[in-house]
Image (spheres, helix red, strand yellow):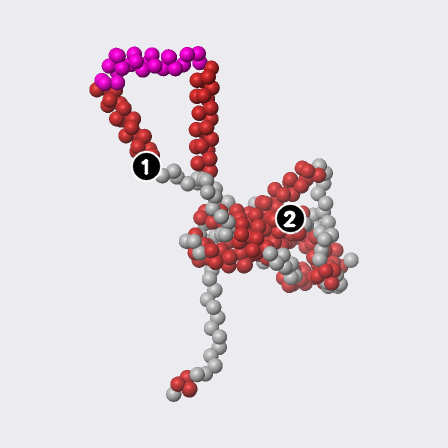
Amino acid sequence: MGAALAVDLPPVAAPVVDDQALIDATLTGLSDAFGELVTRYERAVYNLALRTLHDRTEAEDAAQEAFFKAYRALNTFRPGAKFSTWIFTICYRGCCDRLAKRKRLSGDELPDHADPSAGPEAQAERSDDAYRLRSAIDALPEKYRTVVTLYHLQGKQYEEIATVLNLPLGTVKTHLFRAKEQLRKALTL
Amino acid sequence: MMYDDDALDRALAVLPLEDPPANLHARIMAATVYRPRATVQQWEVWTLATLAALAMWLTWVALSTPRLGERLVDGVTRLVDAGGLTSLNTLMWLAVGISAAWCLSQITVPQRRRVEIR
């Protein structure tokens, strides 16, 4: 009887905890909950910082700073809002501050080129379409590059992109349209 | 390869994100949940600094005022002689002052209001 019950059951998927529950758990003192939030978003936040700053070391610092600020202000997070939009907003503002500081220190235009310290993985994928697309994105002006990056990270959620960049919805759509035009031109050359 | 709008969207959708450095997660955790709590709060620093400034100012006043000790002793003596310290009004106001100070000391200092980012 007992052996008959010992059938192979499909593995039960772990319940997916939503971001709000993780935030609530963090606020009650569960450090693992914040660790899960970091795991979910560190990649996206790092990529946003990297695309904006074009510098791996600075992007790492900016990502850390964004999570630090988010952690300190976690009790002000509005229930119902999207954590991704919130953390991207914090990260983007931090990146803007860094760019402004960089501009002040250098006293001239910001370098608008890809990070020359790309690792061996980047060297290996040089022939890939992904590499070409990434290079084309890197070559875009900053305002277009950020819109495309957020479009990539957040999907087609224009309102969220507009919130992160603090731009009108129409401007986001225009920037995205022009960015795609430039990308298409760069990729079909 | 020609990229139309859909092809570009598809290419963007499958564009892999770059891996963050291996130690980024540990760095973030060390800077947030595992960060040691500050032993002194900011308002405590401000209070101590204010008290220190007040003490320095009083010291400066004491050093720059000639015969300050004598003046203080004279003043207190005159006050006692006039019966100021033993009058009912003075005692009542002293009691009110001490009560108010005690009540204020029982108030918990409110936490700084945080600014909502979004």
Q: Residue at the spot x=31%, y=15% of the render?
A: B76
Q: Nearer the viewer, mark 2 or mark 1?
A: 1
Q: Which residues are magenta?
A: B65-87
Expressed as whole percent of the image width and height from the top left, the position of residue B41 reads 45, 40
For mark 2, name the chain. A
Residue B40 position (above or below residue A127): above
Q: Residue at the spot x=65%, y=43% of the render?
A: A99
Residue nearer the viewer, A169 or A86:
A86
Q: For the residue marked with disc 2, what is the amino acid?
A: Glu
Residue at the right extreme? A189
Residue A148 position (above or below residue B55): below
Dots 2 and 1: beta carbons under 8 Å? no
Disc on res. A105:
none
Q: Residue at the spot x=51%, y=57% of the render?
A: A35
For mark 1, name the chain. B
Residue nearer the viewer, A15 or A171:
A15
Residue nearer the viewer, A147 or A52:
A52
Spatial CA span between label 2 and label 1: 46 Å
Q: Residue at the spot x=72%, y=63% of the render?
A: A125
Q: Quadrant of residue B24?
A: bottom right
Instruction: State yes or no: residue B56 in magenta.
Output: no
Disc on res. A58:
2
Expressed as whole percent of the image width and height from the top left, the position of residue A10 reads 48, 77
Instruction: State yes or no: residue B80 in magenta.
Output: yes
Q: For numbered disc 1, what is the local secondary structure?
A: helix
Kindly tell me whether residue B27 is visible in this rendering: yes
Disc on res. B106:
1
Expressed as whole percent of the image width and height from the top left, the position of residue A154 reads 57, 56
